[in-house]
Structure formats: C-alpha cells, structure tokens
Amino acid sequence: MASDTDAGSQSERKTAIHERHADAAETVVPEQLGLYIGGEWVESASGETFETRDPTTGEVLASVAAGNATDIDTAVAAATRAFERGALESPATREQLLETIADRIEGEQNAFARLDVLDNGKPITEAQADAYLAAQHFRYFADIVPDDEQTPVETGGSGRVTTVQEPYGVVGQIIPWNFPLLMAAWKLAPALAAGNTVVLKPAEQTPLSALKLMAEIDDELPDGVINVVTGFGPDAGEPLTTHPDVRKLAFTGSTAVGKQVMKNAAEDVTDVTLELGGKNPIVVYPDADMETAVQSTIIAIFYNTGECCSAGSRLFVHEEIKEDFLDRLVAAAEDLTIDDPLLDSTRLGPKVSQAQRDRTLSFVEKARDAGASILTGGDVPDDGALSDGCFVEPTLIADIDHDHEAVQKEIFGPVLEVFPWEEYGEMIELANDVEYGLASGVITSDIEQANRTARDLEAGTVWVNQYNDFPTGMPFGGYKQSGIGRERGRETLDHYTQTKSIDVSL
Ligand code: NAP
Ligand code: MG
C-alpha cells in the first residue's frame, strides 16, 4: 500500500508528467493534420476527423483527417499522375530524393523521437534509435537505387535477350502503430528507390510522424510521389487494397487483416508483401553465458514494451540452468524502470492504447485462470503517477500449456512465457508449434549447436547470443503465417519491381 507521503510524491510526479507531455506536444505535434495528396494538405472528403491520444497521459494530442474511399481515389489518381509524368524515372533523382529524406529525418531526429513517444508511448531512447534507423534506411536504399540499364541474359535461343527491372507504378502501403516512423521508412524507401509512387495509410493510433515526415520533405518531394491518407482501417485501408489502379500492396499488421489484404489483392492479381507478426521462441542452452542470456531475453521481450512483431515471447530454457536463469531473469525484469517514456531512464512505457493494455491483461488473466504461475508482473504498475497511462508490468509466466491461447496468439505486450526443456527434438517441435515463423533467438557458447538450431527453427530471422538486432541491409520477414516477402534488404527491391524480358531477333 502506498503511504500518504508516497501518494503525495506520486501525485507530484503525475503532474510533472502531464506538464512535460503538454510542453513536448506544443513543440512537436505537426501543424498540418490533413491528408497529404498530390503535394497539398487537404481535408478529408467527408470533412471528418479522428483523435489521436497520448497513451502516457490519456490526453488528446491532435485531431487528424479521417480519409475514406473517395480520398483514396484522389490519392491514387495523384500517385498515378506522378508516375505517368516520370517524376521518379531517373535513378539519380531517386537517389537524391532518398538522401534528402534521410537528411531531413536526421535534422529533426529529436523532434521525430519525441513525437513518436507522445503518439505511441515508446521510451525516448528507443524512439531516438527509430529515427536514427529510419534515416539510415533511406540512405541504404539511396545507395542501391537500381539503374535502368538492360541486362543481357544467356538463353538457349539465337536472339539477343535482355531484361530490365521496371517499377509497378502506384504502390499501396499500410503500416501499424508499433514503430510509426520506422515502419513508414521501411515501406517508403524501397518503393521509391525502385521508382514507384506511393499511397501510405498510417495506423489510426499513431498518424503523426508520417504527417511530420511529409511536412519536412514537402519542398523537395515532387507532387504525388508520396501521398498519405490517414484514417481507419476499414474506411481508408480497405479501399486501398481493392483499388484497381494500385499495382502492388505492402502491409504490416495483424494476421487477420493481412489475410484480408491478400484476398483483396487476389481480385486484381495484385502483387502483395505481408509482414504479420510472430510468437517467437528463444532457446537457451545450458552452456549459455548467463548474463548474455538474461540481457538478450530482456531485450527480446521488453524492447518497445513488447510491441514488436519480432518480440521473443516464448522462452525455452534448459532444465539444467532453469532455476538460476529464471531467478536472474525475474530480478532483471523487476529492475526495469517503468515510468514516463519522455525520461531517458525509462525502459518501459505504456502500451499504445487502453484497448491494447486491456488485451494484454486479458491474456494474462486467461493464463492465470488456466492455473499458470505468474513469476512476476501480471498487472498494471502500483504507481499512482502512472495511473492515467496504459502501463503493464513486465510479466513472466510459467507452468502454462503450450496449446493455451495465451501461448499460441501474439500478445504484443511485455509478457513472456517460459518452457523448460531437456530433449532437443521435443524442444524444436514445440518451438515450431505455432502458426507464426517470424523471428527467434538461440543463446549458447557453441557455434555448431547455434547453427544446427538456427537451421531447425522455422523462422525468417535467427539471432544468436543477441536479440532484436537490425543492422541495415539484413533482410527481415516471415515463414509460415508471419508473412510473404522480405523487407530491409537488397532483395526488397525485387518486391517493388517487375522483370521485363526483351527478346530481339538479330
Ligand atoms: P491491424 O488491425 O492489423 O492494423 C494494421 C494496419 O492495418 C493499420 O493501419 C490498420 O488501420 C489497417 N487496417 C485495419 N483493418 C484494415 C482493413 N480491413 N483493410 C486494410 N487495412 C486495415 O492491427 P491492430 O489492430 O493495430 O493490432 C492488432 C494486433 O495485430 C496486435 O495486437 C498485434 O498482435 C498485431 N500487430 C502486428 C504488427 C506487426 O508488426 N506485425 C503490428 C501491429 C499489430 P487502423 O489503424 O485504422 O486499424
Ligand atoms: Mg496515439
């Protein structure tokens, strides 16, 4: 129970948090909150808006235009005109544009970081990393802008065959709320590098950094090359996925919506890439360096408050070291600072929304009902200063059946489930026994063992003795129902181009 003095200081801290956020909002929330179409800021066709909130304070940050099918039509038309007039035809223009975008993000790195803290609730140190990585991502694709040369191809025929990689035209991109700026960067950079024009639909919870990005680059961006339509999934997202003039779709979000996007894409045989989350295993061997194992696990599940598609959320720890390892892990989890995400010392901020907080807690509740042990956490923090926010304690769960819904489903919060193992084959079978296959971790000092395990795990990424590392250029994407295609790497350009063969009779 909090004493009177605790309650007093908590209420002072709460006031300080509200003031800090109000001050930050005044400086970083963008002025332009309309749709960005054809290089202009416009109201939505319906005139409607929606509110985006700060999940730390519960306060409204801004009212943003709510786009619908009419706005998507206008945006696709603007993107089509930009593509047809050859706005991105020259590789040099594309390289220059991507470098400029990187420069502008770098120049505003602190403001972008604070904006994503306000809109999403992520800790400021992580939001700084997002802004840094977003700029690097644009630079990476600036460096590998494909040329428009024809490449000779060896064939069995007598003619002269060359191939050329051509952009699709208008690309529709739909992104989630967990990395608002970085997900926009992951999507936009390769699409533009390949010469496509874009209509982007940000998530309703976190529309602000995409709008700020447009405001920052508006003077350099040819009209219609990027169009941003904020709004709700069914109203603004769905019409983008069914639009006949959109030639390629890229989506990141839930598996349920991803499946619908793919069905819609099938109507017009539109190419689609999907990044759909995961329920990712971490395997800890008895020979693991204990400190590496604990720190990697902490980063795996608590980075970005667990709101990572790559989050390591199922821990397979060997029986031999289980007790010692779990003691240390619980201590490390309890040591994480949950506080105002605008403070440098904060390691865990709030979840993005009340709905997401309640969803996380409901999974914990179901696990508890099924007789699972909650090793630590499992509730909202006992800290009055944070009571206006959507906070959830770092939570470790043991003694739960692997078939349980809380294990099989992506919780997308700071919740880790623990499974002791002894026999390798049984462990691998369980580690692979989910519908997802996005990422995974292996902690061991034996590299042979690491490689064997990496080969046996059904996952698009395997981190060894580390977790959530995203070096520029490393491809990222899912096996099984975690998605189709790879983002971040050179091969991503293949997803944004199509091959034309030119066969000349000599
Ligand atoms: P979601 O509904 O899949 O949202 C992702 C994006 O799709 C958002 O921009 C969303 O718009 C849009 N969308 C929603 N319905 C659509 C539709 N019918 N057609 C086209 N676009 C549509 O995900 P969520 O509801 O934000 O989160 C639910 C769960 O998804 C999370 O708890 C987590 O498990 C998973 N998730 C995964 C990732 C990932 O990185 N793979 C990211 C976020 C969430 P609105 O914002 O307007 O809904
Ligand atoms: Mg928000």
Image (cartoon, rainbow, N blue to C red):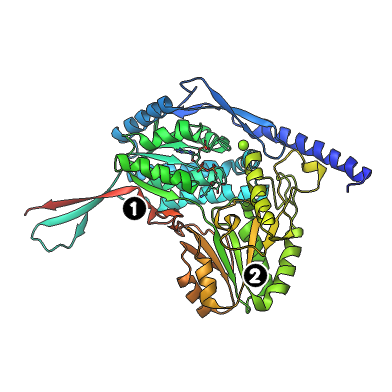
- Label 1: element kind: helix
Kindly tell me whether mark 2's CB lies below 8 Å from ligand 1: no
Count of marks placed on residues: 2
Closer to us: mark 1 or mark 2?
2
Q: How far apart are marks 1 and 2 (CA)?
A: 36 Å
Q: Which of 91 and 169 is in front in this view?
A: 169
Q: Which quadrant would residue 88 be assigned to in this image?
A: top left
Q: Is residue 141 visible?
A: yes
Residue 28 in percent (x, y) is at: 64, 34
* Residue type, numbered disc 1: Asp
Residue at the image position 81 percent from the left and 36 percent from the top: 15
Mark 1, Cα crowd under 10 Å, few <14 / some 14-19 / many 20+, is some
Residue at the image position 47 percent from the left and 36 percent from the top: 201
- Label 2: element kind: helix
User: Is residue 357 positioned above or below 430 on the image?
Assistant: above
Q: Which of 45 and 149 is in front in this view?
A: 45
* Residue type, numbered disc 2: Ala
User: Is residue 308 positioned above or below 69 on the image?
Assistant: below
Q: Mark 2 points at which residue?
A: 293
User: Is residue 428 positioned above or below 167 on the image?
Assistant: below
Task: Decide if residue 409 is on the left or right side of residue 332.
Answer: left
Checking the image for residue 494, the label placed there is 1
